[in-house]
Image: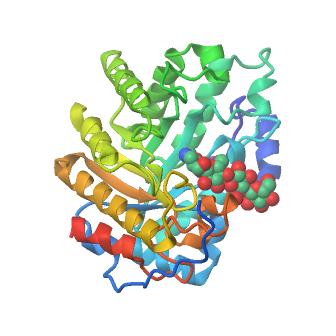
Amino acid sequence: MSLPGSLYGLSRRSLLGSALALGACQPAAQSQTPTVSLPPLKSIAPFPVGTAVQAVHLTDPSLARLIVAQASQLTPEWEMKMEYIVRDDGTFRFEAPDAIAAFARANGLGLFGHTLVWYAQTSPAFERLDEGRVSFAQAYRNYIHAVVGRYRGQAVGWDVVNEAVAEDGEGWRDSLWSQRLGAFEHMVLAFQNAREADPSARLFLNDYNLEWIPKKRATFLRLVERLLAAGAPIDGVGTQTHVAADQAPGEIARTIAELGQFGLQVHVSEFDVSLSRAQGLRLNRAELERQQAALYAEAAEAFMALPPRQRFAFSFWGLRDSESWLKREDGRDTPLPFDDQGRPKAAAAAWAAQVG
Ligand code: G3I
């Protein structure tokens, strides 16, 4: 395994640094939904079933068992991002992503890298880069090569650029990356560097609210076209699909169908359906859970309508409600396919009925 290195490359300082490093809605009660009995999701689906994980999840025996039983590929929820890997001094740490990668290998699961370039995550190491020692572009390259290269041959793919489109769909986001390397050029560079670092990994542009904001979806699609026209080595498009139970029917399906127009791989990359965020509906919990199940079914049906070669994976942003990021907003939210005890919910059955 290569040494972690740093933004500055494998200098003596970063070797020491890395040596040291190697040595770092509706107020609702809990779901009343009866659980159902289902075969494992990955045994039903004719495509990879993914889930977000954190290294700490893998030390919980019941959760680890659920992950291995239900999923065929793992997306590190945060520990393959710059916020974890790049220390303030520019050295890298990989303990947690290495643990997730090892767990995936040991259990015959795929590994999907998330995410290399994101407007929401920069690092003091980039912001305060000592450009007497290395150019910004070279540091950007060093980082991508160090991270993607470390999992070369294991990672099935990467979210190379995450959430590049502006919140309202009016153009692209501004970021440290766009400011330093160019609004479009930083994206092309990211894809090119990732391709060089691991020619076997499929490279994705990933974004969210594409089903919620048609203007954002349109801008995303135009960006894909522009990347393709520029010869950027993009293999797929990811639609995160974090939705709420008041999501208008049909928009998820429309989004997935439109994303399929380029013949690229399509990844439903972070699927969950929040009940608590469904403020548009004055429904009781049972009615919200029926809405949730209908959206699970819609997404599954639309994914199945893609040509098989374009179905990269359908990834949930966690399997068990108890681990959902949405719990931080409202501890009563139940957005995922399995309840806190790891039992499949009606939403999981509705999803399974469309893919089996
Ligand atoms: O576990 C550590 C804890 O030990 C430490 O004390 C604490 C304070 O530093 O941090 C904890 O880690 C946090 C981690 O979530 C686990 O809870 C990180 O700080 C926090 O940044 C991280 O947030 C993640 C967020 O992305 C930012 O990376 C969420 O888990 C994750 O669900 C969320 O996922 C995003 C996707 O990447 C992109 N699409 C939207 C999605 C939801 O926001």
Give the total of numbered labels: 0
Q: Is residue 111 above or below residue 235?
A: below
Q: Position of residue 343 (x, y in %)?
A: 46, 83
Residue 72 sits above or below residue 38 on the image: above
For the point 80% across and 14% down, the residue is 132
Looking at this view, is 22 or 251 the one in front? 251
Q: Residue at x 63, y 67 (%)?
A: 27
**Picture quarter with the C terminus:** bottom left
- Colour scheme shown: rainbow
Q: Percent position (x, y) of residue 259?
A: 29, 37
Locate residue 303, reporting x and y percent: 26, 52
Q: In the image, is residue 147 above or below residue 179?
A: below
Q: Residue at x 44, y 31 (%)?
A: 196
> Does residue 278 show up?
yes
Q: In the displayed structure, does residue 225 sit left or right of residue 85?
A: left
Residue 60 occupies quadrant = bottom right
The percent position of residue 32, horizontal first and vertical second, equals: 50, 82
Q: Nearer the viewer, residue 354 or 161?
A: 354
- The foreground one among 103 and 83 is 83
Question: Does residue 3 appear in this view?
Answer: no
